[in-house]
Each structure stands twice: as C-alpha cells, then as structure tokens.
Amino acid sequence: MKYLYIVRHAKSSWDHPGLEDYQRPLLEKGKKRTRYVIDYLQKHKVSADLIISSHAVRAKETARIIANGLNYPEDAIKISKEIYYGNSDGLFNHFYDLSEEVDSLFMVGHNPTFTTFANYFMEKSIDNLPTSGVVCIEFDTDSWEGILEVPRKTKFFVTPRSLRDKLSRKK
C-alpha cells in the first residue's frame, strides 16, 4: 500500500502587508490547531517516509510542525517551489521520482490547488480543504508508478474543527 497525505498549511497571518505572499508566517492559532491534527495522526500511528512542502513560509512551518509530531527529521523535508507556483496537474509530477521505499508521502501546500488535487482522488469531493486539514488517500499498490490508475480510497479527511468538535462531544 502507498499513502498520500494532502495537507493544507496552517492558518497564516495577514498582519504584515509589506510581506510577499510566500513570506507570510503562521498565526499562533494556526500552530495550536495543527496540534489537533498531529494528535490524530499519532493516535492512528501515521508515519512519514517523505514530506514535500511548498517553499512558502507558512507551508514550511506547517511541514516542520508535522515532521516534529511524527519524528521525521526537519532537514529531510523536501522543498518544492512547484507546489506554490503550480497547479493541481503539476502536483502529479512529484510522484514520478519517488523511491519505492517511500510508502507514506506528505505534501504540504495551498488552496485552491490542494482542494482540487484532493478531489481528484476522493470518492466524494469536498468544497474546501481548510487550513491544517489533511486528506489521506490509500492506494492499493506497492509502486508509485501508475499511481493514477490503481484502486484507491479515502482513508480519512480531518480538520482541526472536526477533531475539536469530536473531542467536545466526548466530554
């Protein structure tokens, strides 16, 4: 099995109008909300064999938070400007050079591209991949080659809000 985790960056700040869009940092609220997602991933024993992130500050910060939560080395995060500048079709190019040893791939990036990308794989489409949201797609294959043609299913779609609401219902 191969697993693709499509992750939208955490909530970012608009407080610095002089910054270029790719330079915007995360809000503390965004970092905190990502903790719900990390807890979920840890509880479900998710691991990362490779994390690829947009070069934008908010995406790299989100990738680092996830890496730390999953005991993945920060310095092994691969940075891709194509994730920031590209479209959903361009994201498929990241599959072509993957080692077969990579079973669990995290891609961290932006909307609207990531919602479109996630919908390509999902049985039931979503209107929006919220900040810190994660879609996990499970592929019934041992190879990334031909990944677009193999059977797949949505393993989960989680957001900080859905996880927080679930926790509050348990109380």
Image: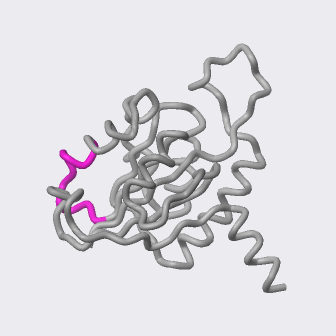
Q: Residue furthest bottom?
A: 170
88 lies left or right of 162: left
Q: Nearer the viewer, residue 130 or 58?
A: 130
Residues in magenta, as a range: 94-103
Is residue 155 positioned above or below 27 on the image?
below
Is residue 16 positioned above or below 122 on the image?
above
Quadrant containing the C terminus in the rendered view: bottom right
Is residue 79 positioned above or below 99 on the image?
above
Q: Residue furthest top?
A: 18
- The image's colour scheme reads one colour
Q: Main secondary structure of the magenta part?
A: loop
Residue 124: x, y in percent?
A: 48, 65
Residue 155: x, y in percent?
A: 44, 73
Magenta span contains residue 101: yes
Using the rendered view, name the quadrant where residue 40 is placed. bottom right
Magenta span contains residue 42: no
Q: Residue furthest right?
A: 171
Quadrant containing the N terminus in the rendered view: bottom left
Q: What residue appears at the point 72 percent right and 13 percent down from the top-left corner?
A: 18
88 lies left or right of 42: left
Q: What residue appears at the point 51 percent right and 52 percent down from the top-left corner?
A: 7
Q: What residue appears at the point 69 percent right and 38 percent down from the top-left corner?
A: 12
How many circles with numbers are drawn on the protein?
0
Q: What residue appears at the point 79 percent right and 26 percent down from the top-left corner?
A: 15
Is residue 141 positioned above or below 15 on the image?
below
Q: Nearer the viewer, residue 119 or 5?
A: 119
Residue 17: x, y in percent?
A: 75, 18
